[in-house]
Image (cartoon, grey):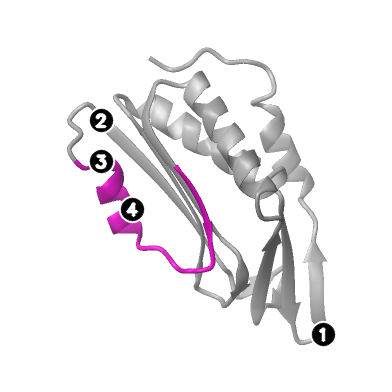
Amino acid sequence: MIRVQQEDFDIGAEVDALRAGRTDIGAIVTFTGTVRDTAGGEPISEMTLEHYPGMTEKELERIEREANARWPLQGTLIVHRYGPLQPGDNIVLVVTASAHRQAAFEAAEFLMDFLKTNAPFWKKEAGPDGGVWVDARDSDDDALKRWQSPKKAAE
């Protein structure tokens, strides 16, 4: 399931909804990204996330399908916010559920590595000197490279 929204999300409620009525799930991995109050040692007063409606959802659905093809997952969820956000606000939630922990962990890492580099979101951080558009870091690109060669799904 994919949602791109301005509203905040409740992590516990999202996990409960994903696992409701399921007894085949042995592992649930969650990742929540939040707005920091600094970047590179500089204070941040606000982060604004923009996206291209329609294109963003299609790309997130594509990568979610790829995760489900690579690992034996019983459920996945990506919730990504857009609009102005304050330090401490939730930005993104990734939840993966599988019979076994290795698949859930690897799929969650795969999804986050994609979101950090290739998801069609644009981030602007505002501080005392104004706003700056943020580029992906080389380390994020390096993390994504490990998934470019097909890996055997965890059992």
Kindly report the distance in space between the C-alpha atoms of the residues bearing marks 4 and 2.
15 Å
Location of mark 2 (residue): 25
Q: Residue 21 at x, y = what percent? A: 17, 38
First in sequence, mark 1 or 2: give its number: 2
Location of mark 3 (residue): 19
Residue at 20% in and 34% down = 22
Amino acid at pointer 2: Ile
Q: Which residues are magenta?
A: 1-20
Kindly report the distance in space between the C-alpha atoms of the residues bearing marks 1 and 4.
37 Å
* Camera-nearest label, 1 or 2: 2
* Camera-nearest label, 4 or 2: 4
Residue at 71% in and 55% down = 52
Please report contact status of discs 3 and 4: CB closer than 8 Å, yes or no: no
Residue at 51% in and 20% down = 69
Residue 73 vs 114, above or below: the answer is above
Location of mark 1 (residue): 129
Quadrant of the frame with the C terminus: top left
**Residue 14 marker:** 4
* Camera-nearest label, 1 or 4: 4
Question: 139 left or right of 13?
Answer: right
Residue 2 vs 72, above or below: the answer is below
Residue at 29% in and 57% down = 12
